[in-house]
Image: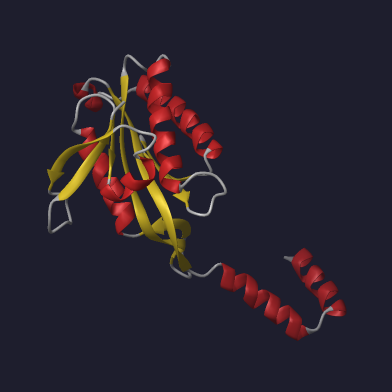
Amino acid sequence: MAKSLQEKEKLESYVSSDVLREARESVLASLQPGGEKIAATVAFVSLLPADKAAVKTGGAQLIASVNRFFNFSQVLCTENDGVIDKIIGHTLMMVFRAGSDRESHQLRACRVATRLVDSIKASELGSSCRVAAGLACGQLVSGKIGSRNGKLDFTVIGDTVNLAARLKSYAENLDGSVILLSDAMLPEISGEFAIRLESEVQLKGKSTQTSVYRVDL
């Protein structure tokens, strides 16, 4: 506390009180909730036991497997200009923004998901684990979410996030490793990946059926 007061007094000897006040207000403003609209692809990816019945058992081995999965994901995500936005249990939420000098955000996200499946299959986890992923693209709100006096979380929100999460949940109920896509993903990735219609499903929160597409692995 005393050190802070001394530093404040030193600043005041060089800078006017008006400048100090504006600087303080600028810092406080940067900590306020707020956001911007962006175009991006959101991917929810989960590591699950290959045997669905084993999901309930958990255990130290599952934790070790999930940590290995996170390591694979971090490397692939960074290589493809994505970020890991959240870790929720055994699930990762990854965001790939538009504006990269490389390929489209849809293509980069799908490439990470498929390579992650390949990495798991080629590792010691291949015989005991599977991957469930849901990918959706569109407009999002990106920024600091929270209260002025509480915790602030830099993240993305919007219907695209909800759709990707629901596609991942649907993929978890299918057999084996599965990557599901929203129809908006197709124009940007169909030239590199084999895609087929999985089904027309009624997803939670949607008033009409949603066309769900699947990447052939």
Task: Check the image and name the residue furthest to the right.
Answer: 13
Residue 142 percent location from the top left of the image: 45, 61
Q: Give the answer, above or below, for where 168 lies relative to 160.
A: above
* 191 or 119, nearer to the observer: 191
**Residue 93 seen anywhere in this rendered image of the structure:** yes
Q: Quadrant of the N terminus?
A: bottom right
Please report the residue visible at 28 percent of the width from the left and 28 percent of the height from the top. 216
Q: Quadrant of the C terminus?
A: top left
Q: How is the image coloured?
A: secondary structure
Image quadrant in which you'd find residue 127: top left
Please report the residue visible at 44 percent of the width from the left and 56 percent of the height from the top. 155
Image quadrant in which you'd find residue 205: bottom left
Query: In the image, 204: left or right of 115?
Result: left
Residue 169 percent location from the top left of the image: 23, 40
Please report the residue visible at 68 percent of the width from the left and 80 percent of the height from the top. 22
Q: Give the answer, above or below, for where 155 lies relative to 66.
A: below
Please report the residue visible at 42 percent of the width from the left and 41 percent of the height from the top. 107
Residue 212 percent location from the top left of the image: 21, 43
**Residue 87 seen anywhere in this rendered image of the structure:** no
Query: In the image, 15: left or right of 74?
Result: right
Residue 79 percent location from the top left of the image: 55, 36
